[in-house]
Image: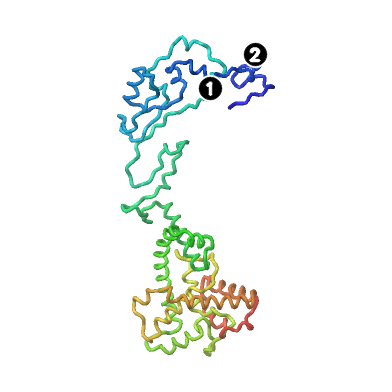
């Protein structure tokens, strides 16, 4: 309702307040008796109503029936073939002709205000929806006739799934970036607290998320282990009949420490073994498609891979092709946690020494060319926290 102040010189409807015959406070408001004196036909004209275009409406309008507002048969399909009803202003289809003498009568100020406040409805034309596998946003679905750019459309398979290669270049780039971030997070982040909490409390949410990363991580770990296998075999000189050597390397996680020229295991720089550094560097810092050069370089996963490969050789015989390609995460979660505990032990013992170790590792794995003197210059023993440098 529009509010008109006494101080206004010109009303919102074009007349001066001083020129009006009556103030707003003295304005006459129709009483119930006034409406009762009107004919039923005049009352119908005062009721805003919406009717569907169709033969039944036209017949009712032509007949001049005043028994009340007719109930439009919604089930009746109009000749335009649409199943959705379309609404128009009653004046656009009515054949009822009002009394011309009454039209000539000047409208009162109240009627003019009612006309201005009466809602106007614009007819919306709905185009037929295209029959295509590509999703489109119809213009009728938005008040502003907004449509998303064509390159945002998704292409669905016959079963309703989304195939990466079926999408356009822009969509593929977004999905590949998401997969990249997922792999990086799975390596360098222990968990996602917010997402983890939602998955714990929303089963449908967890179920929807589980399938895609589970399938991707399987192939990712397989490729990583195949690369690690080549490095480990070459570095440790594994060959048929090496069961004793493998057992010695697995004892107390000796394989994460480099040795000097005499074979002495030194531990002031754990995880500095050449095999560990080469796996991290070639997997994540070589500039390839699956590289992770911007992340933390805590080496829990690569050293878990080394453990898995050594276990494959524990019998002293070369593993089969199936063993080389396979990596069962649940079978190696124990060694993963053990290496994580070692890192936590260093961190809790001395934050400076922990960061010094991480900085040294980062420098080693991110080098363009791997120096052959890495192992000899990084002489280590079994973990000797007191001997570790702080800078």
Residue 288 locus on image (x, y percent): 45, 65
- Name the mark on residue 114: 1
Alpha carbon separation for disc pair 2 and 1? 20 Å
Quadrant where the C terminus sits is bottom right
Q: Residue at x 45, y 19 (%)?
A: 43
Q: Do the residues labelled 2 and 1 touch (CB within 8 Å)?
A: no
**Residue at the spot of label 2:** 19
Residue 90 locus on image (x, y percent): 41, 23
| Residue located farthest toward the top when viewing the structure as drawn | 101
In front here: 229 or 101? 101
Q: Does residue 37 sit above or below 295 in this rendering? A: above
Q: Which residue is drawn at 60% across and 26% down?
A: 2
In front here: 193 or 345? 193
Count of marks overlaid on the render: 2
Please indicate whether residue 181 sits to the left or right of residue 349 in the image: left
Give the crowd class for mark 2: few <14, some 14-19, many >=20 residues within 10 Å.
few
């Amino acid at each position: 309702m529009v509010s008109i102040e006494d101080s206004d010189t010109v009303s919102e409807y074009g007349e001066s307040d001083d020129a009006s015959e009556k103030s707003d406070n003295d304005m006459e408001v129709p009483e119930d008796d006034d409406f009762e004196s009107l004919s039923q036909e005049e009352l119908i004209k005062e009721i805003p109503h919406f009717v569907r275009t169709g033969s039944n409406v036209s017949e009712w309008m032509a007949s001049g029936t005043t028994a009340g507002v007719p109930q439009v048969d919604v089930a009746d399909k109009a000749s335009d073939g649409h199943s959705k009803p379309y609404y128009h202003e009653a004046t656009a289809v009515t054949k009822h002709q009002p009394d011309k003498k009454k039209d000539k009568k000047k409208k009162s100020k109240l009627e003019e205000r009612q006309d201005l406040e009466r809602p106007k409805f614009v007819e919306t034309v709905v185009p037929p929806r295209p029959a295509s596998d590509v999703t489109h946003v119809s213009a009728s679905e938005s008040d502003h006739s907004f449509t998303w750019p064509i390159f945002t459309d998704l292409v669905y398979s016959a079963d309703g799934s989304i195939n990466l290669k079926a999408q356009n270049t822009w969509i593929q780039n977004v999905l590949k970036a998401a997969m990249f971030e997922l792999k990086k997070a799975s390596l360098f982040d222990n968990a996602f607290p917010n997402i983890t909490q939602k998955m714990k409390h929303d089963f449908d949410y967890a179920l929807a998320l589980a399938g895609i990363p589970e399938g991707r991580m399987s192939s990712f770990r397989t490729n990583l282990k195949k690369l690690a296998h080549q490095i480990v075999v070459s570095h440790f000189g594994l060959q048929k009949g090496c069961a004793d050597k493998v057992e010695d390397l697995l004892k107390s996680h000796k394989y994460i420490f480099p040795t000097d020229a005499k074979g002495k295991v030194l531990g002031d720089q754990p995880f500095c073994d050449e095999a560990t550094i080469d796996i991290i560097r070639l997997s994540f810092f070589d500039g390839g498609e699956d590289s992770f050069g911007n992340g933390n370089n805590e080496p829990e996963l690569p050293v878990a891979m080394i453990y898995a490969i050594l276990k494959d050789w524990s019998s002293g015989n070369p593993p089969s092709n199936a063993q080389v390609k396979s990596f069962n995460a649940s079978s190696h979660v124990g060694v993963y946690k053990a290496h994580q505990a070692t890192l936590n032990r260093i961190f809790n013992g001395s934050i400076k020494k922990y960061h010094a170790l991480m900085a040294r590792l980062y420098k080693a794995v991110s080098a363009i060319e791997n120096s052959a003197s890495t192992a000899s210059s990084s002489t280590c023993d079994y973990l000797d926290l007191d001997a570790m440098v702080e800078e």
